[in-house]
Amino acid sequence: MKWWWYLFCCNILCGQSFLEEWTPARSTVLDTLTINNCPPEYLWQWFGLSKEAVYAIVEYREYMGHIMDPIELVGLPGLSKQEIQNLAEVLAFSRERPKRNKSQLTYSGRLRGGLRMKIQCTGNHDHFEWGGSKVLNAANGPFASTEPLAFFGIKQKGAVTSKWIMGQHTLVLGEGLLSGSNGFGSSSTREQFSQGLRGTVSSYGTRRNGMGACSQYRSGRIYISLDEGTGIGGALEYTGHESTLGFGQIHGAGTAYFKRQWKSHRWFGEFTTKEQALGWNWWRDDLLLESYLHRKEERLHTALSMQWRDARGQWSLQLFEGRFKVNWQGEFLRYQCVASDEGTLRHRLSLPWEHRAVDLHFHDGTYGGSIRSSKRIGDWQLQSAVGWVHAETAPIWLSVPVATGFIGAKSVYDDFFGYHFKANTGKWSTSLSYDFTEQFKEGFSMEWRYATALDQLRPMAPKIRIAFFNYRRLQKRNWKYDR
């Protein structure tokens, strides 16, 4: 391991300069910032974006100009849906336009060995916010619906900012050791940025069903959450002097957590009776270094990561539990090497050019590749991918387009030759895939997604109300004999 430490020390001492200490008050500076003029260091230190996401936003601003809407950030490297939503809530995209009320209706589905459909509605207006979702599944029989997820919230601003939520919600504290995470964390950092009380209609993460309340004061916050199954939980936080200190109780167990920032250093951690986590990261110009310790079940887990950028491209190095992960992104070539738990090395080499990209994979005797392309025709954005795999003893992951708008990862354990296609325009997105090594029923899959603002459905409200009334009337009586 000596050469790893030699590599770290060489990059740390390579003539970087410290960031200047922030002299203005954070609240005053935030009132003048937008996504278009926010410095890169603030995007990481204040808003919790990964180094990869910061570079992607800065590069997008340089080439495309002003960012007018959060939808422009979808698909940028290192940014998830949740991170884009969090950024849009705290950082304005344009000071000339007032913040608009947003409400959206989303219909999505998947056909693969059965039919799965999901309807989701979220929105807010003035002091109110709401959301709901319902999933229908059909596999070799009639539809079976899951229990609907819904929440309703009220916000009150003043000397004390308060929020009340009834229904499905999440309460994320500290590093999520007890409360869990409401999303998938970034691989570039172990620090948990998304915290607090929020209503949710997602089936991922640790949800609570009941009632929650939050009050924010000048120097801290108070959280209270009542869950039907686990009882009362909550936390008391103190915020000041670039630090946060909190004490809480979730699932009958106590927790203490903290965050501390000084110049370009950040410390964070959470401590419970069964688990303890402690981390530190450091930003020096074009270098991000982070160390993380996690003690669970009498075993200490360690993680060390470093990201930097030079004339040869962007680099990322992670060491965890005797394994490592290396990423390099150059202008004409990209390479990734990951050590698995079984001691094997998984390699991936990508060659992007124009609107295409070729990926080559090798993992312990298993090899394969894919050719991806993207093209815009009018209002339509078209993406396609052809992949093939010769499997031996270990799996590989192919990048394929999916209807959700992000590049998905398809795990392949057997011989594979298939085609993937995606088309999206504004509100509508659909994707098709077919594995030629399987029968049509097992090898074909389809996904779709339609999203629209509820304001656009307002002119159709009377017709929807009449159709729903007629449907309910037909359910209650036999209309054939009433004619």
Image: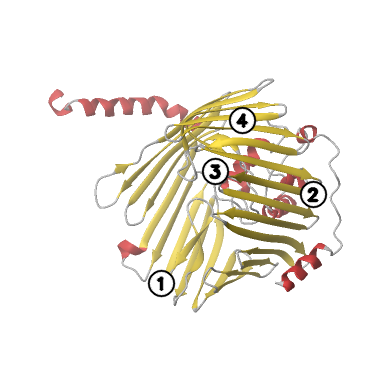
Q: Earlier in the sequence, mark 4 or mark 1?
A: 4
Q: Earlier in the sequence, mark 3 or mark 1?
A: 3
The answer to which image quadrant residue 481 occupies is top left
The one of 104 and 261 positioned closer to us in this rendering: 261
Task: Please give the residue where the numbered disc 3 appears in the rendered image.
Answer: 178
The answer to whether any part of residue 5 appears in the image is yes
Circle 3: element type: loop
- Number of other residues with Cα within 10 Å of mark 1, as a class: few under 14, some 14 to 19, many 20 or more: some
Q: Position of residue 332 (x, y in %)?
A: 68, 69
Task: Please give the residue where the numbered disc 1 appears in the rendered image.
Answer: 414
Residue 469 lies left or right of residue 251; in this view the side is left
Q: Earlier in the sequence, mark 3 or mark 4?
A: 4
Q: Tell me which residue sits at (69%, 37%) in the image.
A: 245
Q: Earlier in the sequence, mark 4 or mark 2?
A: 4
Q: Position of residue 483 (x, y in %)?
A: 15, 24
Label 3–label 4 contact, CB within 8 A: no
Label 2–label 1 contact, CB within 8 A: no
Task: Point out the residue furthest to the bottom here.
Answer: 365
Instruction: Kindly identify the amino acid type of the residue bearing the numbered disc 3.
Output: Leu
Task: Please give the residue where the numbered disc 2 appears in the rendered image.
Answer: 264
The answer to whether any part of residue 44 appears in the image is no
Circle 2: element type: loop
For discs 4 and 1, the disc positioned in front in the rendered view: 1
Task: Please give the residue where the numbered disc 4 appears in the rendered image.
Answer: 100
